[in-house]
Amino acid sequence: MKLQMVDLGGQYKKIQAEIDHSIKEVLSSSAYINGPKVHAFQKELEEYLGIKHVIPCANGTDALQVALMALELNKGDEIICPDFTFVATAEVVKLLGLKAIFVDVDKNDFTINIESIKSAITPRTKAIIPVHLFGQCANMEEIQKIAKENSLFVIEDTAQAIGSDYIFKEGKRQKAGTIGTIGTTSFFPSKNLGCYGDGGAIFTNDDVLAEKMRKMVNHGMEDRYHYKYIGVNSRLDSVQAAVLSIKLKRLESYNSARKNAADYYDKCFADYKQITTPKRVDFSTHVFHQYTLKLKDVDRDKLCEHLQNKEIPFGVYYPVPLHQQTPYKEERFSETNFLVTNELCKTVLSLPMHTELTKEQMDYISNTIIDFINE
Ligand SMILES: *Cc1c(COP(=O)(O)O)cnc(C)c1O
């Protein structure tokens, strides 16, 4: 059995004719960057998300950077980020000379902890970057409330949760990334909506910010060779947009395939107290960018070795908390503030998760893990 963490080849085979045709159209159009396909995809994504403005860009890291640039912050301003996330979230903060203030995450859903945000706020705090980790939204209603009370911006890092619904207490639903001041996402190939190279996008309902960010991703250019802002070179190319339009039409079905796979895994592990399967919160749907187990009384290193021997791919997202990484350390960080993240980094394990997983594959993966636990 040939197992992969993400089966992009299998997914491509099913849409190959449509993809190849659309890419060939780009090749003969010569509109390789910001062509009609980029514009079409932008409109389709705006409609799908129910947001006024989508600004396509080159990757999810640039999306975060441009979002921060647009907010006109000052050196030393503090940005609250979860300690348990991919480094890009905090990297752009530091690149811009801002302070990344890490806070702990929730022990059940692994997204930014609300009480920890409250205790981290100082007069220099300017923004919060919640990450909708592994496919599930952070508690946006609470975050928006804190942001309002303290006049903070909210940038939603939606790189892992495109298509997920935030569910408000009164039942209203809104797409992840469309609730805060700005939302960002990544179209890296392995993300839930992935292209065949790098890609990203920024979302906002704010007309002024949108116009500014649209210029900023293209060197801050206002009219041809006249510049209004310092910008970056961060454009989406037309080949990627062609792929994304085709895959966006299938995103709902891709995400439900992931959810079905997750539900199946859950059943396989249901009887084992050493394994905690991903918790579903009631304020968000889950699009399972990752299917991540939490292990208890299991030697993770030995289990990983066992999986390797059985040729089962796995991931440890993430092995080291960001507050402990050399470029991100701060005097004010104390280990007692990061109890959940510190524990998660030692106990999480992500299993293969993608749109092409079969029950047979999941049986093999789960049985291999269960055999190890039972030994
Ligand atoms: C993937 C990812 C990013 C960065 O996206 P790139 O397109 O690789 O730059 C940012 N934040 C999170 C949480 C991610 O998972």
Image: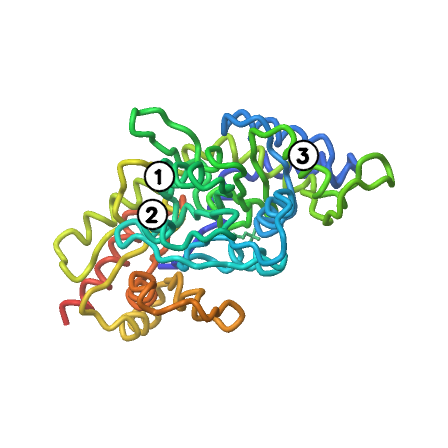
The label on residue 142 is: 1
Label 2: which residue? Answer: 114
155 or 246, nearer to the observer: 155
Q: Position of residue 219 (x, y in %)?
A: 76, 46
Q: Secondary structure at mark 3?
A: helix
Which residue type carries mark 2? Ile
Q: Amino acid at mark 3?
A: Val
Q: Is residue 315 left or right of residue 47?
A: left
Nearer to the camera, 32 or 339: 339
Q: Disc 3 to disc 1, how far (Cα)?
A: 35 Å
Which percent across, then down, holds residue 266? 22, 48
Residues at marks 3 and 2, CA–CA distance in whole angstroms: 37 Å
Which amino acid, by three-letter code, is at mark 1?
Glu
Expressed as whole percent of the image width and height from the top left, the position of residue 331 reads 46, 71
User: Which is nearer the eye, 94 or 313?
Assistant: 94
Mark 1–mark 2 CB contact (< 8 Å): yes
**Distance from Cα at disc 1 to Cα at disc 2:** 7 Å
SS at circle 1: helix
